Image: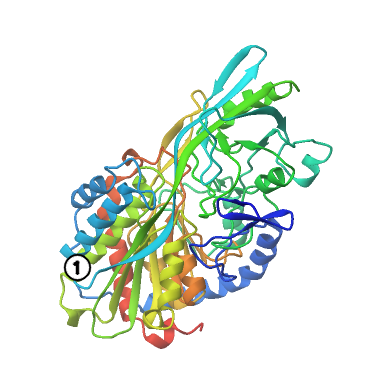
């Protein structure tokens, strides 16, 4: 029996054998299906209407709290954000990630979380050191700008040289009559587009917070986190047979060149799929416009390509960081985010981290008697490793601590600026707006009402409030793991700018002037959740 990475060759197939975490049928596996989405939406529309009506009635009778919280200024929040983003990345298991974990642990203690804990997770640190794509066009070698595909197989310094074969999107029909054995497969990666404006008109949603009137019927969003034909696997789960990667591998390909066809720029530094699964053959990403050149070159059947991807796999670890700020009741509101990032991660998830710390700072300054409920603060590791930290935390405490959690308020990608594509340079260009955001809310009008109220009162821009199962999957992000594994309700606040998961996610993409007002909006929301009767928060259980 031959072994390669986290795969063993059994009965003619490579099968996933991850020794670091046990496979679980309950692990999240996001399967975005257009057909299922449409059917689900049609079922949701009357429910959305009913919940929205009840939520508006609740808002009329909601009373503002007299509690005064001291929220850090935008400048104070920015200062911490800059400290978090001082490294080129916070990739799980690396030295940089460990330093940030120590920094966050110290800040949590400094800001008043006296019982803060660090809980270890073991994992594989996959790290690339050198990568190149060279295409031999006649006697002329052409080097194509590229980036490695996370967790794929390494080569030696000379790489792999073989004929190139283009297979379109890499569907079953695309491989028909194509011999890819001992060759390098070239394929287009497809990203779905959400017709947001039409959905808003059709479904109305829970609420649309759009004080600048940015959204209209033509508004669309490319879901750059969702690779339609190269999807992630569930953590520790079976491989996806609908993946261009595995179709190429099963047919004997030596490697892949994947063109980011639908990205709104020529970016190639895409970090994904981030499922934590080690894969056997090397793969490289190429930007949309560089991909046009690659496709033209591959039309020549005699063209050879060389893939170089050098690096190391080492056993490492990471930590969840968490603690409880006691209140008058053992019932808890959970505040969560993740601390890893693929690159500098100013918005993902530097902004989530500083919002988390801002709430800790504010709520720890008041006496226990003024906190009607306790607050569980949790920063999970490995969002970009199949959500390993959130999954481990939820499974470990689902029958203890998580039983007292009434709702998880998860904060990600806050105050992220919107970008478009410059038609001349094909680089990202700022639009002057905030990136489109969504707040996924469990289908309970008593949770929906305070979110609408907070967004309305604080003029939150470019944000839609939608049911937690809007995409027929759990909420996208850490909240989905907590919801699935511990069966808790969620309010999941997240924005989706196109530079997420790329090297373009830098400090200039954060609207620093909105950090304080957004933190105040979040604190008002928590304040409302603190005072909603328990039977109403658990009314949909």
392 w.r.t. 463: above or below = below
Query: Which image quarter: residue 25?
Result: bottom right
Q: How many marks?
A: 1
Q: Which residue corresponds to the image point at 28% horizontal and 81% vertical from the top-left?
A: 373
The residue where tag 1 is placed is: 69
Q: Secondary structure at mark 1?
A: loop
Residue 32 appears in which quarter of the rendering?
bottom right
Q: Which of 315 and 380 lies nearest the eye of the viewer?
A: 315
Q: Nearer the viewer, residue 468 or 108?
A: 108
Instruction: Kindly tell me whether residue 31 is visible in this rendering.
Output: yes
Q: Position of residue 191 (x, y in %)?
A: 61, 45
Image coordinates of residue 193 in percent, x first then y, are 61, 47
Q: Residues within 10 Å of mark 1 (few under 14, many from 20)?
A: some
Left or right? Give the position of 508 relative to 308.
left
Residue located farthest toward the top when viewing the structure as drawn? 139
> What residue do we see at 69% from left, 28% from top?
164
Quadrant of res 285? top right
Judge from the rendering whether residue 432 lies leftward or rightward of residue 244; answer left or right: left
Nearer to us in this view, 116 or 280:
280
- In the image: residue 101, left or right of residue 261: left
**Residue at (22%, 73%) from the top-left corner?**
115
Q: Position of residue 400 (x, y in %)?
A: 38, 83
Residue that sits furthest to the front in the current view: 1
Q: Residue furthest right?
A: 177
Viewer-side residue, 356 vs 173: 173
The spot of residue 283 in percent (x, y) is 58, 38
Residue 265 seen in the current view:
no
185 shown above or below 69 = above
């Amino acid at each position: 029996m031959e072994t390669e990475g986290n795969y063993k060759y059994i009965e003619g197939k490579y099968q996933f054998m991850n020794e670091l975490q046990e496979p679980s049928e309950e692990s999240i596996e996001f399967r975005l299906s257009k057909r299922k989405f449409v059917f689900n939406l049609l079922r949701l529309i009357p429910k959305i209407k009913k919940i929205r009506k009840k939520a508006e009635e609740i808002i009329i009778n909601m009373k503002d709290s007299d509690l005064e919280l001291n929220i850090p200024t935008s400048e104070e929040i920015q200062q911490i954000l800059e400290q978090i983003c001082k490294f080129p990345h916070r990739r799980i298991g690396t030295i940089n990630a460990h330093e940030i974990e120590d920094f966050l642990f110290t800040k949590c203690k400094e800001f008043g979380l006296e019982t803060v804990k660090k809980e270890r997770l073991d994992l594989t640190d996959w790290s690339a050191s050198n990568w190149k794509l060279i295409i031999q066009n006649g006697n002329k070698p052409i080097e194509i700008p590229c980036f490695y595909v996370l967790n794929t197989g390494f080569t030696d310094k000379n790489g792999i040289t073989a004929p190139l074969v283009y297979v379109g999107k890499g569907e079953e029909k695309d491989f028909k009559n194509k011999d890819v054995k001992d060759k390098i497969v070239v394929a287009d990666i497809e990203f779905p587009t959400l017709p947001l404006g039409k959905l808003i008109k059709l479904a109305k949603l829970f609420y649309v917070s759009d004080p600048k009137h940015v959204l209209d019927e033509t508004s669309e969003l490319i879901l750059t986190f969702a690779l339609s034909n190269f999807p992630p696997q569930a953590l520790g789960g079976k491989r996806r047979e609908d993946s261009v990667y595995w179709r190429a591998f099963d047919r004997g390909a030596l490697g892949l060149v994947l063109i980011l066809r639908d990205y709104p720029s020529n970016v190639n530094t895409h970090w994904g799929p981030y499922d934590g699964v080690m894969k056997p053959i090397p793969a490289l990403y190429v930007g949309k416009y560089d991909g046009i050149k690659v496709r033209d070159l591959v039309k020549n059947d005699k063209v050879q390509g060389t893939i170089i991807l050098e690096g190391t796999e080492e056993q490492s670890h990471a930590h969840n960081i968490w603690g409880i700020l006691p209140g008058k009741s053992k019932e808890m509101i959970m505040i969560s985010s993740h601390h890893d990032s693929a690159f500098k991660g100013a918005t993902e998830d530097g902004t989530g981290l500083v919002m988390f710390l801002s709430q800790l700072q504010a709520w720890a300054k008041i006496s226990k008697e003024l906190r009607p409920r306790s607050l569980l603060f949790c920063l999970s590791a490995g969002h970009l490793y199949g959500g390993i930290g959130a999954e481990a935390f939820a499974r470990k405490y689902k029958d203890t601590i998580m039983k007292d959690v009434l709702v998880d308020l998860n904060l990600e990608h806050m105050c992220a600026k919107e970008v478009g594509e410059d038609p001349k340079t094909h680089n990202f260009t700022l639009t002057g707006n905030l990136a489109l955001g969504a707040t996924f809310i469990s289908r309970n009008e008593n949770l929906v009402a305070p979110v609408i109220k907070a967004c309305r009162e604080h003029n939150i821009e470019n944000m839609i409030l939608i049911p937690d199962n809007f995409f027929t999957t759990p909420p996208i992000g850490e909240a989905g793991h907590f919801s699935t594994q511990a069966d808790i309700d969620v309010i999941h606040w997240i924005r989706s700018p196109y530079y997420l998961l790329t090297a373009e996610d830098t400090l200039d993409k954060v609207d620093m002037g909105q950090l304080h007002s957004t933190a105040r909006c979040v604190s008002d929301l928590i304040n409302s959740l603190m005072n909603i009767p328990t039977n109403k928060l658990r009314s949909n259980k």
